[in-house]
Structures are given as C-alpha cells and as structure tokens.
Image (cartoon, rainbow, N blue to C red):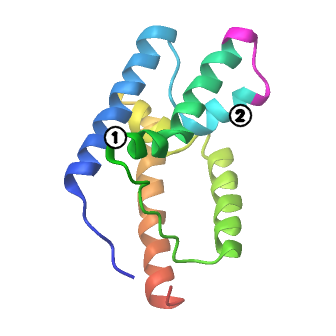
Amino acid sequence: METVFTPWASLAGGVLIGLASILLMLSLGRIMGATGVLAGLFQPRDGADFQWRAALLAGMVTGPVVVWLATGAMPAVEVPISTAALVLGGILVGIGVTYGSGCTSGHGVCGMARLSPRSIAATVTFMIFTGVTVFVARHVIGG
C-alpha cells in the first residue's frame, strides 16, 4: 500500500479545520470535537443546540459535493481494507474516544490549542497508538 503525500491539500484542510474550530468557539463558545458534536446531536439540550450540531455535521458530510461542484469530479476514495476491518476499527475508535474523553479533533485541534495537559497527553497517546497500528497493519498482518 502506498501513502500519497499531499502537502497543499493537507495544509488547506488543516487551515479550514482550524478556522472552523475558531469560529465555533468564538460564535457559540463550543469545542469542535467531532464525537462530542455527534453525541450531542442525539441528546441535544434544546432546539438551538440541535441546529448547530446538525449544520456542522451536514457540512462535514457534504464536503465531497463541494469538491465535485468546484472541480467537476468527485474526490477519489480508496479503502484498501475489508468492510469487517472498517467495522472493527469503528468500534475500537468508539471505545477509545469514550475512555479518552474525546477524539483527535477535540483534543488534538482544540485542546492542544488551549495547552490543556489532558489534551496533550491524549494526543500523544493517539499518535503513539496510530504508529503502532500502522506498523502492525502493514508489517505484521501485511495489510
């Protein structure tokens, strides 16, 4: 499996995520952790809470449509693993964000920007286990 390095697209995506995080914090005083946003969608405090969460998630999901409208082609998505592996990965991520009290977007983007010791520790843990997972998947299992 080859990993394609896309520095400009990655930089643009990072800038957009950072700007969205800042705007959400400035406008609503909320942290843009994707799992927290999703979880709160199913148990909103009120109608306004549901609306901003639904709008944010709709924006995340419709991103490929924006690319299609801008370029005339849908972005290529290749998933080099089985559906079972995707489901298992999703379950493991769900367990991890529960025990880690948040996900990489909440801790890595927002928490580290606030110099939160808990978020720094969580992000370091995420990165270590990401490296271990990639190593095992590529060199031990042979994915």
Which residue matches tag 1? Answer: 70
Identity, as a three-letter code, of the amino acid under mark 1: Ala
Range of magenta residues: 42-48
- In this image, 113 relative to 100: left or right? left
- In this image, 85 relative to 130: left or right? right
Q: Is residue 119 above or below residue 137?
A: above
Report the residue that reaches farthest toward the right.
43
* Image coords of residue 93 (percent x, y): 63, 56
The secondary element bearing badge 2 is classed as helix
Identify which residue, 68 or 79, lies in the foreground: 68
Identify which residue, 66 or 22, lies in the foreground: 66
Nearer the camera: disc 1 or disc 2: 1
Residue beneath the point at 66% across and 59% down: 90
Q: Is residue 114 in sight in this rendering?
A: no
Q: Is residue 9 above or below residue 69?
A: below
Which residue matches tag 2? Answer: 39
